[in-house]
Image (cartoon, rainbow, N blue to C red):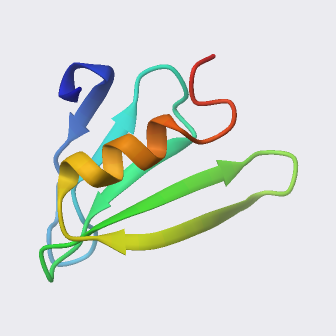
């Protein structure tokens, strides 16, 4: 499942977190939070804002939820 995402390491971990970006839709990403959880974000271009989903304890669960989001399989 990880092959469907691209890992982007933060240049400055004190300012921003690493993320996994969905290859099929760059607007869907999974933030690797400092507390060890994973948070899904979706950027809606027409609104110019991010929407966030619940945090997940396991990356695989977050990836499954991200792949199930509308427009995730463009």
Image quarter of residue 37: bottom left
Residue situated in front as seen by the camera: 27 or 70: 70
Image quarter of residue 6: top left
In the rendered image, which quarter contains the N terminus? Answer: top left
Q: Residue at x 68, y 30 (%)?
A: 71
Residue situated in front as seen by the camera: 14 or 65: 65
Judge left or right: residue 31 versus residue 28. Answer: left
* Residue furthest out toward the right: 46
**Does the rendering let one see residue 17?**
yes
Tell me if residue 13 comes above or below residue 19 in the rendering: below
Q: Residue at x 20, y 70 (%)?
A: 57
Relative image position of residue 9 (x, y in whole percent)? 16, 47
Q: Residue at x 15, y 83 (%)?
A: 35
Residue situated in front as seen by the camera: 2 or 19: 2
Tell me if residue 58 comes above or below residue 26 in the rendering: below
In the rendered image, which quarter contains the C terminus? Answer: top right
**Does the rendering let one see residue 10?**
no
Judge left or right: residue 73 versus residue 38. Answer: right
Number of numbered callouts drawn:
0
Judge left or right: residue 42 versus residue 2. Answer: right
Q: Residue at x 30, y 29 (%)?
A: 5
Relative image position of residue 18 (x, y in whole percent)? 21, 56
Tell me if residue 44 comes above or below residue 67 in the rendering: below
Relative image position of residue 49 (x, y in whole percent)? 72, 63
Judge left or right: residue 40 versus residue 34. Answer: right
């Amino acid at each position: 499942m990880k092959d469907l995402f691209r890992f982007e390491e933060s240049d400055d971990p004190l300012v921003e977190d690493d993320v996994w970006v969905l290859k099929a839709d760059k607007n869907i990403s999974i933030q690797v939070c400092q507390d060890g959880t994973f948070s899904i974000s979706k950027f809606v271009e027409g609104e110019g804002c991010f929407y966030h989903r619940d945090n997940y304890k396991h990356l695989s669960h977050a990836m499954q939820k991200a792949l199930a989001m509308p427009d995730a399989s463009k």
